[in-house]
Amino acid sequence: MIIMLLCPHGGAISLSDLADVAQVLIAIANLFLAAYVLFYQIRKDKKTDNQTALLNEQNIKLQWFKELIVQPNMGNITKFYSELSSIKERISTSNLTTPAKEDINNFVKAELAKFRKSFVDVLQQVDRGFANQLLENLDKLVDGITVAIFDDNLELDKPNVYENNIGSKISYSQNNLIAQLYNYKGLSIEKDSTISPRSSYGLAFL
Amino acid sequence: MGNKVYSIDLEDFRTKGAKVFTTRPRGIEVRKRSDIDAIEPQYDKIIVTIPNDISSINPSFLEEFFKNVVTKLGEADFYKKFSFVNNGRYKIDSDLAEAVERILRIENALA
């Protein structure tokens, strides 16, 4: 059709005519290609802008998280674990009476309650799932101490027995808490507080 | 209010020789085994008996054990409906208060 239009007199098509037609086709193809590249680039730029905006928002949230929640509570975190470690002196007496064990255990539970109110509850307002993860870590520690204190088979006045059953648990929990805070990405961790019975606490079910 | 009373004896859920109730998984287990969520609406008063020689019931256990009934009843009605009997040294009050506060803090955060 194009060739017919270019040759109105019905004469033979010359090589020059074909070259003209080819040029027109190439120009049209170029036009489509340029439009496609332009459209693709605009879409890519928009996607990159959205990702950058999200990243910026995440960075701002992390900065606030650090400045408003973590830094003001670093003292509370250290104090909590230091208070728990202080029970070593009280346990060092052999043949602790049941009331003495109960006093130590009540002290540990009271420390957790204070720490929960001052730190975990603040986190709860920012990220419920993350706060529950931290509380799981803390509960695991306190439950482990309770079990050890009331286990008559453990001679906790012996340093290595204390270390294996309480001291190492305190260190592990503290390191774990710091790792949890360090690895927090500012993204909400939605998780129901119900713990699966399959999640092991490494404790005998008493 | 009527006077239908139901009793739960924690001795029935105790591991032989254990002096403590701890951990969340154990609280979930006792909640299911005792069927407390289904029993609660059928009675006006529920009495929980704590074995005399128990030394501790940790908040982690209590939080999971009472989670659904506290959420449903609210703090005031829970304390009206549930009472605790223990003739031994252990007093549940502060651990129970901590557990109830934890449960309701989750609810408040969701509100």
Image (cartoon, coloured by chain):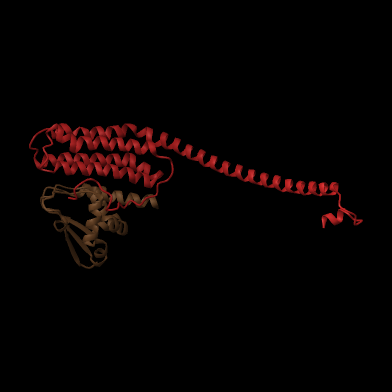
Chain colours: A red, B brown
Q: Identify the residue at horizontal 10%, vertical 42% (top origin).
A: A153
Rendering quarter of residue A83: top left
- Number of numbered discs present? 0
Q: Position of residue A172 (x, y in %)?
A: 26, 36
Q: Identify the residue at horizontal 66%, vertical 46% (top origin).
A: A39
Query: Which residue occupies the foreground of this view, A63 or A3?
Result: A3
Query: Which residue occupies the foreground of this view, B4 or B42?
Result: B42
Rendering quarter of residue A89: top left
Query: Which residue occupies the foreground of this view, A102 or A88?
Result: A88
Relative horizontal placement of residue B23, taking residue A92 as reference (left or right): right
Rendering quarter of residue A131: top left
Quadrant placement of the N terminus of chain A = bottom right
Q: Position of residue B90 (x, y in %)?
A: 14, 48
Relative horizontal placement of residue A200, taking residue A73 as reference (left or right): left
Q: Position of residue A59 (x, y in %)?
A: 48, 37
- Outermost left residue: A95
Q: Position of residue B4 (x, y in %)?
A: 20, 67
Query: Which residue occupies the foreground of this view, A1 or A28?
Result: A1
Q: Identify the residue at horizontal 44%, vertical 43% (top origin).
A: A187
